[in-house]
Amino acid sequence: MASAKSSRSRPAGHSGVFPVNAAAGAGGGDGGVQLADKLKIFKTDNFDPDAYVQSKCRTMDEKEIRHLCSYLQDLKKASAEEMRRSVYANYAAFIRTSKEISDLEGELLSVRNLLSTQSALIHGLSEGVQIDSLSTGPEGSAEQDISTVEDQEPSEIWKWSTDFPDMLDVLLAERRVDEALDALDEAEQIAADAKQKGTLTTADILTLKRAISENRQKLADQLAEAACQSSTCGVELRAAASALKRLGDGPRAHSLLLSAHNQRLQLNMQTIQPYSTSYGGAYTASLAQQVFRVIAQALSDSAEVFGDEPAYMSELVTWATKQALSFSLLVKRHALASCAAGGGLRAAAECVKIALGYSELLEARGLSLSSVLMKQFRPSVEQALDSNLRRIEESTAALAAADDWVLTYPPTGIRPFARSSAGNLALQPKLSSSAHRFNSMVQDFFEDVGPLVSLQLGGSAMDGLLKIFDSYVNLLISALPGSVDDEVNLEGLGDKIVRMAETEEQQLALLANASLLAEELLPRAAMKLYAMNPVRGPDRQSRAAEQREWKRKLQRTVEKLRDSFCRQHALDLIFTDDGDTHLSAEMYINMDNTVEDPEWVPSPIFQELYGKLNKMASVAADMFAGRERFATLLMMRLTETVMLWLSDDQSFWEEIEEGPRALGPLGLQQFYLDMQFVILFGQGRFLSRHVHQIILNIIERAMAAFSATGMDPDRVLPSDDWFFDAAQETISRISGKPRVANGEREVNSPTASVSAQSVSSVRSHGSS
């Protein structure tokens, strides 16, 4: 073997060393590197394990050496698993070929025996002709030979060969198989010695061989008949198979061994009735116990008598696969079918887990039948899975039609998030009635689906749950008053009726439902599910990545509801009931055409925006307790929606920049005041850095349009302090909070100085 060679006997070309950073990729995902590529270095003829280890460990500390050892162990396991999958991928062809080879060997053995018999017959006939020719010698010579033979005493070998048939009949009648086999072997040896030494005539040798052949066949038939008897115990069955193999008929012996076990299994299964048990799990357990016990016994008997010869192992695997397939079909017909039709996911999962539990007992002995079972079980389990998910979806939709969208603690009869007590009442989730029911059914679903994670069906369950959560969020979107005109949001809802959320408190409750489910309740339930089926090594990292991605998908679904909420509230602010707009270019352009002095306060739409944000923030503080970040992002998203609409409104900017009437000094001052007002009330609460930059870009665009008229914005605009005071006065009036003493800015505000500097820079840039 390559590992036994000295490193000095290897070529000095390739040391078998790959970059150190390859060991860092020992996890499940190696950036797309295939296992075959990682193993190439070990397959080269000049790979030197000593040089490989020395090059790795020379500059490594103990931690890095342990990491390398762990990497090599993971690579070894991955290689073994890859080899196993490769073998099973071509196992049917391998079994078929092995069976054909075994049959061919049997036929060759029969041909060899036939040729040997014919050769002996021809040889005997030729010697008989020579004997007859001797009788034509001088007259009286025959009589002399006969008299000579009659005068001689019969030899011991001749006497033994004469008594051999009768002795063998006695041994066979008394079923003394081992002694009969020894006698046959002895007769074979005597016949060979007699032919070589000439101690028996050719006729006697032919008679002896004929007796040996007939008694071999007689003993083989007797052994086969004994093996087929249902009363034959395991010891007798193995002895009969071993004797048949010793007779040279190994393929027949192995087939009879498996046939006997199959006959015994069929007799035992007749006592198990599908409807004699109270539920499918008991029937599955009783059936599995019989089937896999017989398969295990057949595996032991085959190994004891035939060892690990490939031809016999292939036949055994084929037979065991057939038994497992028959078992799975029975379980599917009498247990899983009814579970799947009724949506009994827990019962279906229990049946499958019981079956696979018995199957796994054989894997330690090298026989894996799980794939055979799962191929049959998967459709039924998936049907039960779909039925459960559909039931959750329909039940939740029915409750949403009567939901008043008021957040409460879990009502009586609904599974709580934690055990209720005076000390942990705050730990209970506050949801509306339909969300409570959805959460309760999902918790039950996770308990039922627990065994499916180990059956490689956890992915289907998680994807299905993501789908019904998306369906529930669509219901929440349809509960928004403005969603009636949104065909995209109503897609897939069919004829489902949802009660409208009329007030802002109810509409925020929709978001509270979705966000709490997506950010806490569902991910935490999923973590408990995976905790029931722990994994290690690279699989653990892969599972953690899957959990994170699943949670991100839940959150993206919630973002769909959030965006619908913000879009509809933004449209309510911007447009009137009859389709006119509260935010148009005319409201700024017309200011320079009036004779009255304007009242320098922010425009009504921005005052209303601040009032709405202030009110929503107050309500959200209670609804989103512990999840303030979501409430903050919601307010920022609403502000962003309004400002993006202003930034992208082509008709607004066409009239400002290219209209028949230019933007005048008063209009620019009002516009500047509105933007400064949004920056001031939004800083730290309702304004993200992205939206802040959008506002600065809007200001710069308006000042550029004003500069295009030939006027300098700095000459017509008051100082920044004037805008700050006017905006702060309005903020104090709407919020009910007093202004900061002496009219100064809040020095502790994280964005006040930044906002002031940013606006000043825009003014300077516009004037230049």
Image (tube, grey):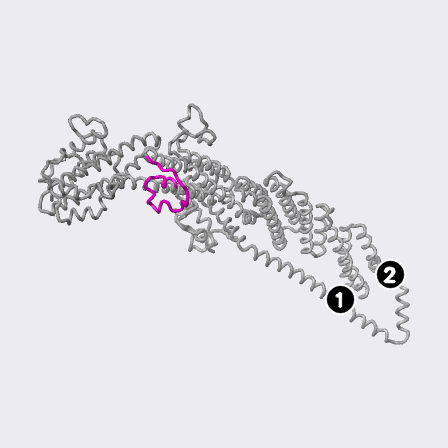
* For residue 237, side relative to residue 580 (left or right): right
Q: List x then y, in percent, for residue 87.
A: 54, 53
Q: Quadrant of the rendered structure where residue 184 is?
A: bottom right
Q: Which residues are magenta?
A: 475-502
Residue hosting label 2: 154
For the question of whether residue 754 can be seen, the reply is no
The residue at 74%/65% (across/down) is 117
Q: Is residue 358 magenta?
A: no
Q: Residues within 10 Å of mark 2 (few under 14, many from 20)?
A: few
> Which is more foreground, mark 2 or mark 1?
1
Q: Mark 2 or mark 1, which has the lower sequence index?
A: 1
Q: Nearer the viewer, residue 47 or 686?
A: 686
| Dot label at residue 705 | none
Give the SS element for disc 2. Answer: loop
Amino acid at circle 2:
Pro
| Dot label at residue 120 | 1
Q: Is residue 480 magenta?
A: yes
